[in-house]
Amino acid sequence: MKIFKKYFKITATPADVYNALTNKAMLEIWTGEDAVMEEVTGSEFSLWEESISGINLEFEKDRKIVQEWFFGEEDEDKKSIVTIKLHPDKKGTIMEVVQTNIPDDAYKNIAEGWEEDYYNGLNELFQE
C-alpha cells in the first residue's frame, strides 16, 4: 500500500475551492459528470460515474475535507483515506492532498487522477 501527498496551488479562495469540492452542482460543472455529494458527515458520495465513491468522514468549513474512498469491493484493505486541507495563499489557495492505503497497482492511476482530473479541473473552473 502506498501514500500520495501533494500540494496544489489554485487561484481561488479557500471558500471557493471548498464549495467546488462539496457542492453537488459545482462538482457537476467542473467534472462534467453527474455527482452524488452532500456536505454531511457519514453521507455517501460518488464522482465520475462512480469511478470514485465512498463516505464523507469529516468537514471543516472552508478548511478541510476527509473522505473514505472505496476500491471495488468494500473490504478493509480496499479502502483509502483522503484528507484535503485548504491553506490560504497570497494568490489563492494551497490544496494539500494526502491519500493513504492506496493499492500498489492503483497508485499511478490515482496520482494521475489528482493531477489531471482534480487539479486541472479546478484550475479550469477558476480561470473562467
Image (cartoon, grey):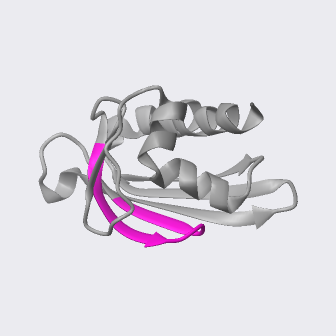
Most extreme residue toward the right is: 90
Residue located 35% across and 31% down the image: 34
Residue located 39% across and 71% down the image: 58
Name the spot of residue 68 as percent of width and height, x first: 31, 58
Above or below — where is 36 with respect to 13? above
Residue located 16% across and 59% down the image: 76
Above or below — where is 26 with respect to 117? below
Q: Quadrant of residue 57?
A: bottom left
Quarter of the picture containing the C terminus is top right
Residues drawn in magenta: 53-67
- Is 64 one of the magenta-colored residues? yes
Q: Answer yes or no: is residue 95 visible.
A: no
Most extreme residue toward the front is: 25
Q: Answer yes or no: is residue 98 visible.
A: yes
Residue located 72% across and 47% down the image: 10
Name the spot of residue 4 as percent of width and height, x first: 50, 51
Q: Quadrant of residue 59?
A: bottom left
Above or below — where is 29 with respect to 12? above
Name the spot of residue 102 as percent of width and height, x first: 35, 49
Most extreme residue toward the top is: 32
What secondary structure predominates along the stretch shown in magenta? strand
Left or right, residue 97 beside residue 49: right
Name the spot of residue 56 as percent of width and height, x first: 33, 61
- Is 65 one of the magenta-colored residues? yes
